[in-house]
Amino acid sequence: HWMNSSIRRLQSSALSSNSSSITLSFNRDVVQAQIDIYDTKGQCVRRTNGVSGNSFVIEKQNLPAGIYFITVIQSGELLATETIIFTE
């Protein structure tokens, strides 16, 4: 779940969805952040740059059902990690 070791870290709840999207909600705004989605093999399956605001919608699109790991990076700093599960 979200790292909370400093005031700069983001916070969210564990996420699971059987719908076509998941919304990440942050406890503060991010500015020009990068959000990467990794599969269980550690392969980056999607990267989104230029994310700003306090929420971000992840569309399932062509991702198969499974477990994915999300990283949120801003100005080269890893702000947060999260695990999401997409079901069929």
Image (tube, helix red, strand yellow):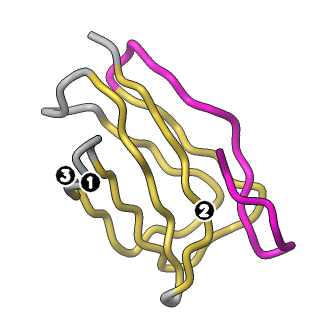
Q: Amino acid at mark 3?
A: Val
- Expressed as whole percent of the image width and height from the top left, the position of residue 70 reads 44, 52
Q: Is residue 70 placed above or below 52 in the rendered structure? A: above
- Expressed as whole percent of the image width and height from the top left, the position of residue 50 reads 39, 75
Q: Amino acid at mark 2?
A: Ala
Q: Amino acid at mark 1?
A: Gly
Q: Which residue is mark 3?
A: 45
Q: Is residue 78 placed above or below 80 in the rendered structure? A: below
- Expressed as whole percent of the image width and height from the top left, the position of residue 3 reads 70, 59
Distance from Cα at disc 3 to Cα at disc 1: 9 Å
Question: Is 56 in front, or is 82?
Answer: 82
Q: Which residue is mark 2?
A: 80
For marks 1 and 2, the one nearer the N-term is 1
In the rendered image, which quarter is residue 57 located in? top left
Q: Is residue 60 left or right of residue 34?
A: left
Q: Please identify the residue farthest to the bottom as the structure is shown.
A: 75
In the rendered image, which quarter is residue 64 located in? top left
CB contact under 8 Å: marks 3 and 1: no
- Expressed as whole percent of the image width and height from the top left, the position of residue 41 reads 22, 46
Dot 3 lies on which element? strand
- Main secondary structure of the magenta stretch: loop
Q: Residue at x 29, y 25 (%)?
A: 66
Q: Which residue is mark 1?
A: 42
Q: Residue at x 65, y 58 (%)?
A: 54
Question: Range of the magenta residues?
Answer: 1-20
